[in-house]
Amino acid sequence: MIRPPSAASAALIEAGRRYYVPNYAQREMILDHGEGSRLWDIDGNEYIDLGAGIAVSCLGHQDPELVAALNAQAHKLWHTSNVYFTEPAIRLAEELVNASGFAARAFFCNSGAEANEAMIKLARRYATQHLAPEQREILTFQGSFHGRTLATVTATAQPKYQEGFEPLPGGFKYGPFNDVAGACAMIDERTCAVLVEPVQGEGGIMPADPGFLAALREACDRVGALLLFDEVQTGVGRTGRLFAHQWDGVLPDAMSMAKALGGGMPIGAMLCAPKTAGVLTVGSHGSTYGGNPLACAVARVILRRINRPQMLEAIERQGARLRAGLEALNARHGVFAEVRGRGLMIGAELCGAWAGRAGELTEQARLDGLLVLQAGPNVLRFVPPLNISDAELDEGLKRLNITFDRLLDA
């Protein structure tokens, strides 16, 4: 097990508790540095990172090429605003559009919530320009998560994220995920857009069933509504395709991404198909920091590194190894009802005495030197760096087995 916090760590933790707004529940450690899929705290404890900063650190920690790209740009230009062009943002927009297979233009911002906020505004403005006055509703899905701004938390069809922030913005309705008949029945002459995650993240790592996205596409086309994909967590290789919707062969009218796009640098993006590429005209939307040259320089390297057949194949291979390891752990301990997901986005649903205890288990795993996440109270979430090595992944699974051995023995 890891060593308890030193006096220096305890003092910093106490300062964090004193000066932060108390909206987080940080673990009792001070992370200091990392390399690959390993992290160390200031007391020298080592951790295997199977959470990647919530699916962000896609190439792990201190990747030499990312560090070099950041350093090179840092010696040239940090910020200009969008009053001016910079080359890193132009090149990244071009590369994302060309890699997407559907998009014509890109908009840059700083986070997934901002990218989804941009898509919501895009949908409403498109409706104003092209649809009847009564066609303004946006359909999202039960179990979804789209962000923490007031509009995106309203789009998030989980009451626990919305409680206490009323009155919420109007014009959203919630449908059943993976229920073709139920969802399509809600797409009607009042619907201007459907916003969906190809794999629900915070909702428990729930992939869209085969045919579900295609049915949404058909229903949207029937009434003239936009189909919007939230790929904030799934995009940039996480599922073994560059974008998760590519598994289904269904194209969106716009798509959001963030997280892995910057590998830890704050960046989000919205890609727009030709149908929506001209909707947001001068002055209709903006972001002071969007397209920041530092973030874009790093993102260009990430996109080039991940959008290669051999890299996407490696993600699929490691995802299969992770699932097999979790299934073997389950055969030994009987703790999971199901292991599901795509690529290196895996959820293990707890059962029996462990049901509802995902948060507790993530802390117990930390005590054994393993960082893993939860997706709701009942699912352990595994979203490691996409370039995790066999040795790192095997060590992470070994430590999770130690955790369950220790808890079951107790």
Image: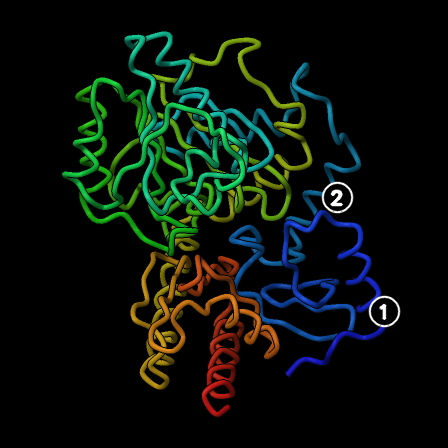
Left or right, 22 with reference to 159: right
The residue positioned farthest toward the left in the image shown: 181
Q: Is residue 218 above or below residue 326?
A: above
Nearer to the camera, 268 or 6: 6
Q: Secondary structure at mark 1?
A: helix
Label 1 vs label 2: CA separation? 30 Å
Dot 1 corresponds to which residue?
A: 8
Q: Is residue 46 above or below residue 287?
A: below
Left or right, 311 with reference to 164: left
Dot 2 corresponds to which residue?
A: 71
Left or right, 371 with reference to 129: right
Label 1, residues with CA under 10 Å away: few <14, some 14-19, many ≥20: few
**Residue 127 appears at what percent x and percent y?**
35, 13
Q: Which of the image's four quarters has the N terminus?
A: bottom right
Amino acid found under the numbered disc labelled 2: Asn
Amino acid found under the numbered disc labelled 1: Ala
Which image quarter: residue 344?
bottom left
Identify the residue at horizontal 81%, vertical 75% (top origin): 6
Number of on-image labels: 2
Identify the residue at horizontal 65%, vertical 65% (top origin): 27
Label 2, residues with CA under 10 Å away: few <14, some 14-19, many ≥20: some
Which image quarter: residue 83?
top right
**Residue 138 appears at what percent x and percent y?**
34, 26
